[in-house]
Image: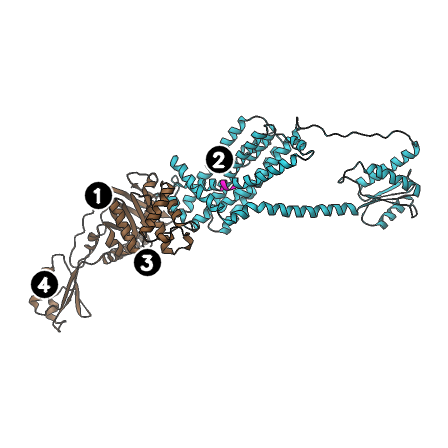
């Protein structure tokens, strides 16, 4: 066993250094920067587009000057209650044109104003006609609300003191909602899935190097093939952990800075996992490792069978699709904690790490995680054993000892 | 027990007894009736051999004879379809990995590794401490006059140089058994000399060397014993001298008398004697030299030149391989005939 572990360590060390001590690793490490940069640029563009779209929209009121003044006053008062995002489209009050009477005239007027008009109010304010582009849309309701305020204001001529509500944030830090925990569970599933798919996928070509430069023969003669496979996985896991540590540190720093901002701490507090943050993070790392080893072992085993880069690419696709299906299953399980679907997702080896990470967000029990980790570890061993068998049989030309055929003498 | 030759070698005119195959007291590698197929292709058939401890043992054969497959089976890299093997006393070759050094036929090194690191890596795979491997690697490279490239990356080296690095990596951990598959191929004559010296040095250290080749000169100079494989089967096992003894002594006689083709002289020589250039060529038995000399002197045609020599391993090898080809074709024809009859 010691000799096996030693062989694993030697292979892992070689692979780790061969990947990390190259300029291309920097590109690999910094790749998310490009992703974030392009994402930011794209996000800014999309945001600007959304703002432009919103600003170009109008709601129009064609009313008498007296009604127009009241509408304007009500609009200004009401609009302060909306945030930047939820604010209705800009109100344009037209008092310098004949007021349309009836739906047909109002519809004709709305058409004349063009495609940016979301809704149009026409006529006397106490019996208005409202034309809206989308039936039941918010703009039509807003105009109705404005008209209602004006009419009530005029009718009552009230001197009643305005209602001044007091808003305060609810204290959610002490008692996170189950919905928030499910959201946290889903986030855990998503992050684990994304990381394993990005990083474990690298394993598919790892034996191609040895097959290409014929080192595989030396390795196969010197150490058990299982040690070669495990060593390669551990080496790549080391690279992945380095990657995660780098970005985790940056993210942690960002989070530390952000928690100083008003409200952010409270929001984060609302996501408290059932198992507690330290255990949740520790389990997250363990489940990443298990998911990585499981998926990496499959990628490595399949890649070892491939004879060319094209074959590697062809073989990667079905694995990726299967993994996306596992992600879907685990995501569904995250939103249905305690149900049969969640149990199934936790039992299926390839969705188990994701589903169990989600479970840690909503369920405080710890012992079940030990069981799950053992179960996943068993499957890692099984996948590696089968991969080695296939490799020995298919690539090295050896045989299955159980299936060995008796040949003619 | 090593196998006897199934098809006794036919020797022209003079019968040379086929030597008894050897009783090996302490084989470090044993194979018994090993068979391996790749699909329907028969790669190795019924191979048995025994490599004595401390010997240099050659596995000879033409291209595609099954030498590399045999070595890979012996080392446990691939499993045989039938037969048994024993390496360093263990029926499981993999359990003795750290006591074995192996240079595969297809050379392979990581191109971005430095020479010293590559050697240390290969040693570490066989259980040698990494730092010790680096140290030993540098010393061994110095001995082979490769000290100047000790920290050079493999990809910057010539093929022959990289091959020497791999060879050092195969033996850096001082293995008891060294298996070299076609070690001389790709090396220039100077490096071939160095390699031969290295093999002898390792044997002196106490290692057993098993190597495959199809270049007879190296085998003739190095091997204590050898096996010849052809058509996937072992055709011979024994010493170099025993292999050479399969063929009779060859005589080249140049008469002084101008009438060399004289019928009287012709009558003194064996019936299959041939006149080529300025000499007669023929074979005699091991104990026929005195009788021949007497006849030539008494014949009165004079002796301008005379050589009586045992044929080299090259001739013995060609003879054995051709005979195996003939036997194989004959068996194929017989199989086809019996098939048709059925």
Total labels drawn? 4
Q: Main secondary structure of the magenta part?
A: helix
Question: Tag 2, which chain?
Answer: A
Task: Please give the residue where the numbered disc 2 appears in the rendered image.
Answer: A379
Say which residue appears at 76% left-offset and 40% top-offset.
Answer: A84
Distance, label 3 to label 1, CA atoms, is: 35 Å
Question: Tag 3, which chain?
Answer: B
- Badge nearest the viewer, 4 or 3: 3
Task: Please give the residue where the numbered disc 3 appears in the rendered image.
Answer: B188
Q: Earlier in the sequence, mark 4 or mark 3?
A: 3
Distance, label 4 to label 2, CA atoms, is: 81 Å
Badge 4 crowding class, 10 Å Cα cut-off, few under 14, some 14 to 19, many 20 or more, is few
Which chain is the one coloured cyan? A
Distance, label 2 to label 1, CA atoms, is: 48 Å
**Figure quadrant of residue B267:** bottom left
Colour representing chain B: brown
Q: Nearer the viewer, residue A225 or A92?
A: A92
Is residue A385 highlighted in magenta?
no
Q: Earlier in the sequence, mark 3 or mark 1?
A: 1
Task: Please give the residue where the numbered disc 1 appears in the rendered image.
Answer: B24
Task: Please give the residue where the numbered disc 4 appears in the rendered image.
Answer: B293
Q: Does residue B145 lie above or below A278 as drawn?
A: below
Give the residues drawn in magenta, as a range. Answer: A236-240
Is residue A239 highlighted in magenta?
yes
Distance, label 1 to label 4, CA atoms, is: 40 Å
Residue B77 in sight: no
Q: Secondary structure at mark 2?
A: helix
Question: Tag 1, which chain?
Answer: B
């Amino acid at each position: 066993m010691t000799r096996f572990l030693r062989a694993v360590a030697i292979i892992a060390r070689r692979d780790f250094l061969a990947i990390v001590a190259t300029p291309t690793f920097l590109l690999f490490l910094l790749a998310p920067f490009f992703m974030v940069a392009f994402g930011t640029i794209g996000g800014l563009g999309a945001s600007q587009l959304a703002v432009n779209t919103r600003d170009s929209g109008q709601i129009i009121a064609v009313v008498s000057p007296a009604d127009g003044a009241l509408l304007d006053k009500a609009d200004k008062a009401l609009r302060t209650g909306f945030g930047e995002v939820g604010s209705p489209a800009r109100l344009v009050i037209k008092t310098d044109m004949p007021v349309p009477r009836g739906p047909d005239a109002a519809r004709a007027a709305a058409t004349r104003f063009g495609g940016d008009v979301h809704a149009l109010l026409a006529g006397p304010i106490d019996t208005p006609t409202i034309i809206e582009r989308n039936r039941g849309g918010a703009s039509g309701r807003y105009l109705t609300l404005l008209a209602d305020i004006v009419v009530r204001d005029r009718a009552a001529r009230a001197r009643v003191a305005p209602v001044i509500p007091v808003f305060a944030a609810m204290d959610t830090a002490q008692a996170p909602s189950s919905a928030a925990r499910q959201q946290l569970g889903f986030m855990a599933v998503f992050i684990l899935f994304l990381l394993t798919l990005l990083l474990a996928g690298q394993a598919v070509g790892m034996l191609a190097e040895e097959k290409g430069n014929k080192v595989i023969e030396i390795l196969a003669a010197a150490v058990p093939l299982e040690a070669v496979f495990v060593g390669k996985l551990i080496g790549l896991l080391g690279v992945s952990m380095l990657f995660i540590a780098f970005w985790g540190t940056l993210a942690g720093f960002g989070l530390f800075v952000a928690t100083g901002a008003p409200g952010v701490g409270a929001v984060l507090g609302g996501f408290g996992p059932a198992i507690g943050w330290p255990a949740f993070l520790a389990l997250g790392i363990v489940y990443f490792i298990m998911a990585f080893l499981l998926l990496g072992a499959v990628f490595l085993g399949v890649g070892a069978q491939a004879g060319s880069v094209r074959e590697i690419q062809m073989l990667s696709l079905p694995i990726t699709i299967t993994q996306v299906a596992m992600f879907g299953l685990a995501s569904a399980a995250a939103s249905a904690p305690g149900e049969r679907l969640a149990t199934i997702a936790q039992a299926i080896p390839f969705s188990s790490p994701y589903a169990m990470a989600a479970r840690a967000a909503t369920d405080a029990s710890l012992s079940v995680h030990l069981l799950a980790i053992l179960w996943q570890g068993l499957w890692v061993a099984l996948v590696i054993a089968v991969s080695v068998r296939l490799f020995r049989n298919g690539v090295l030309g050896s045989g299955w000892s159980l299936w060995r055929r008796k040949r003619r003498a | 027990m090593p196998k006897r030759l199934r098809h006794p070698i036919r020797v022209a005119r003079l019968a040379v007894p086929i030597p008894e195959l050897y009783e090996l007291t302490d084989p470090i590698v044993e194979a018994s009736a090993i068979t391996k197929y790749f699909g329907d292709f028969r790669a190795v058939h019924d191979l048995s051999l025994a490599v004595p401890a401390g010997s240099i043992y050659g596995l000879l054969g033409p291209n595609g004879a099954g030498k590399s497959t045999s070595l890979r089976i012996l080392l446990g890299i691939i499993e045989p379809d039938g037969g048994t093997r024993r390496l360093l006393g263990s029926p499981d070759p993999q359990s003795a990995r750290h006591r074995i050094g192996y240079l595969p036929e297809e050379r392979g090194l990581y191109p971005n590794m430095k020479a010293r690191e590559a050697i240390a890596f290969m040693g570490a795979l066989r259980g040698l401490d990494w730092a010790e491997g680096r140290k030993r690697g540098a010393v061994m490279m110095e001995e082979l006059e490769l000290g100047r490239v000790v920290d050079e990356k493999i990809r910057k080296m010539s093929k022959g140089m990289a091959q020497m690095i791999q060879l050092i990596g195969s033996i850096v951990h001082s293995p008891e058994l060294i298996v070299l598959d076609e070690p001389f191929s790709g090396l220039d004559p100077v490096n071939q000399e160095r390699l031969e010296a290295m093999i002898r040095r390792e044997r002196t250290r106490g290692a057993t060397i098993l190597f495959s080749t199809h270049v007879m000169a190296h085998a003739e100079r190095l091997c204590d014993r050898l096996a010849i494989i052809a058509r996937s089967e072992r055709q011979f096992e024994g010493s170099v001298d025993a292999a050479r003894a399969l063929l009779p002594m060859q005589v080249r006689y140049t008469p002084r008398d101008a009438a060399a083709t004289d019928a009287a002289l012709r009558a003194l020589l064996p019936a299959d004697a041939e006149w080529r250039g300025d000499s007669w060529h023929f074979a005699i038995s091991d104990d026929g030299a005195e009788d021949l000399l007497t006849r030539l002197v008494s014949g009165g045609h004079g002796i301008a030149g005379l050589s009586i020599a045992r044929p080299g391993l090259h001739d013995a090898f060609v003879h054995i391989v051709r005979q195996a080809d003939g036997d194989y074709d004959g068996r194929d024809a017989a199989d086809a005939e019996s098939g048709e009859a059925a």
